[in-house]
Amino acid sequence: MRLHRNLVYTTIDSLNAIFNEGEYADKVVARALKKDKRWGSSDRKFVAETIYEIVRWKRLYAEIAEVKEPYDRDNLWRMFAVWAVLRGYPIPDWRQLEGTPERKIKGRFDELSKIRAVKESIPDWMDALGSKELGEKVWAKEIAAQNQPAKVILRTNTLKGTKESLRNTLMDLNIETEYLKDQPEALVLKERANVFLTDAFKQGLFEVQDANSQLVAGFLDVKPGMRVVDTCAGAGGKTLHIASLMENKGQLIAMDLYESKLKQLKLRAKRNGAFNIEYRIIDSTKVIKKLHEKADRVLIDAPCSGLGVLKRNPDSKWKLQPEFIDNIRKVQSEVLESYSKIVKPGGKLVYATCSVLPSENQEQVQKFLKTEIGQQFTLVEDRKLLASESGFDGFYMALMERKK
């Protein structure tokens, strides 16, 4: 177990791009992995996992290393040295790692691990907000669970095959998967692998989608032949799932504010063989008004803080600001009031977020049900999915029915 200079240099360059240039970790990692064609899978695994780990534990490592933002290259090397010591790597005699104080690092780790916000490596404001909304006990468990690396979960595209046939196809590629209890289309990878390079992915046999995220489309209770509207479709993970549950029969309208996201969705839909999708950019209020009382089912996968998906996006801990959460709550209220009007009497609406905060979830739904339009709906059921209980992403979903 030794450190290789070219892999570590790539890691340091990548951390600089994420911490100092504001780039997104997933994009930086994807770029880093293309850097050297000679790297084997263990080299790429080292680069990706090390970048993500140092991003995930940024605050803890920075406090142990006694460095402050903005981090110059020496600071980044000091943080890397902390990672290497805590992971048990022998420190090589490179100039950048000279004089690494191994005993001091271990001592500071023990000392700082007594402070939750530092131990779990989150901003103080986030720790205060989480414990205020979820209570000390639940929040402590939840933030610890959110710091575990996410598993890779596949969702079988049932337009093109079964979960069993997909599992066999992947087995032939030496990719082992397991079934998930109570999840009709999910497969969990036993070991991480770049599934996007497989022919099975290029043929649209599956999508990568968290297990709890896969529950949202099923919660909407769609049937083939319905008219369904996904109002915040984005790049369309849930849209494609809905299309498969509709068996390509009926009309599925995918809407978003951003044309670029719908373009991505079109490409994915083509690969998936999903052809009952219509695309509409929300560029004026007319787009929504035209659909008033026209849909059997409406999904509002609302914009949110993303505090349920930190294990998947650890850099968002550092990009998120408290004022963003205040603003996003206002957007959630507006979106619920506006888009709920698309549901026809007797139709159903699902409001969903990838947040664990009650103020973005149950409280939004309760507030909506008291509004003029909200009084026409009844809450059928809601689900709070915590990472600490399920092992997957944190999600919330509420199913409401419009009175006839």
Image: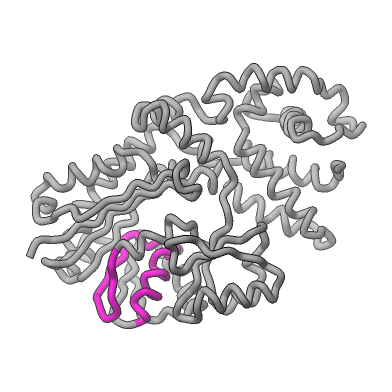
Q: How many marks?
A: 0
Q: Which residues are magenta?
A: 220-248
Residue 94 percent across, percent down from the top left: 90, 33
Q: Dividing the image into 4 quarters, which one contains the C terminus?
A: bottom left
Q: Is residue 282 visible?
A: no
Residue found at the far right of this picture: 93
Residue at horizontal 24 percent and vertical 40 percent from the top: 363
**In the drawing, does residue 115 fall left or right of residue 389?**
right
The image quarter containing residue 274 is bottom left
Does residue 217 sit above or below 22 in this rendering?
below
Residue at horizontal 35 percent and vertical 27 percent from the top: 132
Does residue 152 sit above or below 124 in this rendering?
below
Residue 280 percent across, percent down from the top left: 32, 69
- Looking at the picture, tell me which residue is in the foreground, 239 or 217: 217
Residue 264 percent across, percent down from the top left: 48, 67
Q: Dividing the image into 4 quarters, which one contains the N terminus?
A: top right
**In the drawing, does residue 180 fall left or right of residue 246?**
right
The image quarter containing residue 192 is bottom right
Is residue 244 in the magenta section? yes
Residue at horizontal 25 percent and vertical 64 percent from the top: 298
Residue 332 percent across, percent down from the top left: 28, 47
Q: Is residue 170 visible?
A: yes
**In the drawing, does residue 15 fall left or right of residue 338?**
right
Residue at horizontal 45 percent and vertical 80 percent from the top: 159
- Looking at the picture, tell me which residue is in the foreground, 137 or 235: 137
